[in-house]
Amino acid sequence: MLPHERSLVNKMKNKPFALVGVNSDPEDKLKSLIKKKEVTWPCFFDGGDPSGPIATKWNINGWPTIYLIDRKGIIRFKDHYLDDKVLNSLLAEQTEHAKRLKN
């Protein structure tokens, strides 16, 4: 998964996009992973347990779970895999919406 996430961060560099990770591994393992795999995006520790407070509140029942949240904070997508077609469609929709707001 990390190569896909890294590619996504690079691809979306100049777009209205942010990747945020939530990890349920023990804290020492998470810190090691972030350093070893050169994770450049924010990654939150969820208590070292798959039923941590973030996973519980967001109803995460499998890893990874991917959410796309628009600029209004509305969840537009939730699944275990994000393909480019879905991402591009939602980004185009958000870009078009932003253009309409400017006019």
Image: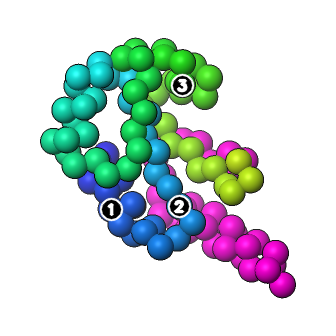
Q: CA distance from mark 3 to mark 2?
A: 21 Å
Residue position for label 2: 17
Tell me which amino acid carries mark 3: Ile
Residue at (46% x, 27% y) in the render: 62
Residue 101 in the image, given as x and y percentages of width and height? 81, 75
Instruction: Find the residue positioned furthest to the left.
Output: 36
Query: What residue is pinned by disc 1?
Result: 7
Q: Characterize the local packing of mark 1: few (<14), some (14-19) or many (20 or more) Cα atoms within 10 angstroms.
A: few
Looking at the rendered structure, the kind of residue marked 1 is Ser
Q: Residue 4 lies in what quarter of the image? A: bottom left
> Magenta span covers which residues?
74-103
Residue 54, numbered label = 3
Q: Residue at x 33, y 62 (%)?
A: 7
Q: Residue furthest bottom?
A: 103
Badge 3, how many Cα within 10 Å: few under 14, some, many 20+? Answer: some
Between the residue at mark 2 and the residue at mark 1, the CA separation in whole angstroms equals 13 Å
100 and 40: which one is in front? 40
Q: Residue at x 19, y 41 (%)?
A: 35
- In the picture shown, does residue 19 fall above or below 97? above
Earlier in the chain: of badge 1 and badge 3, it is 1
Q: Main secondary structure of the magenta part?
A: helix
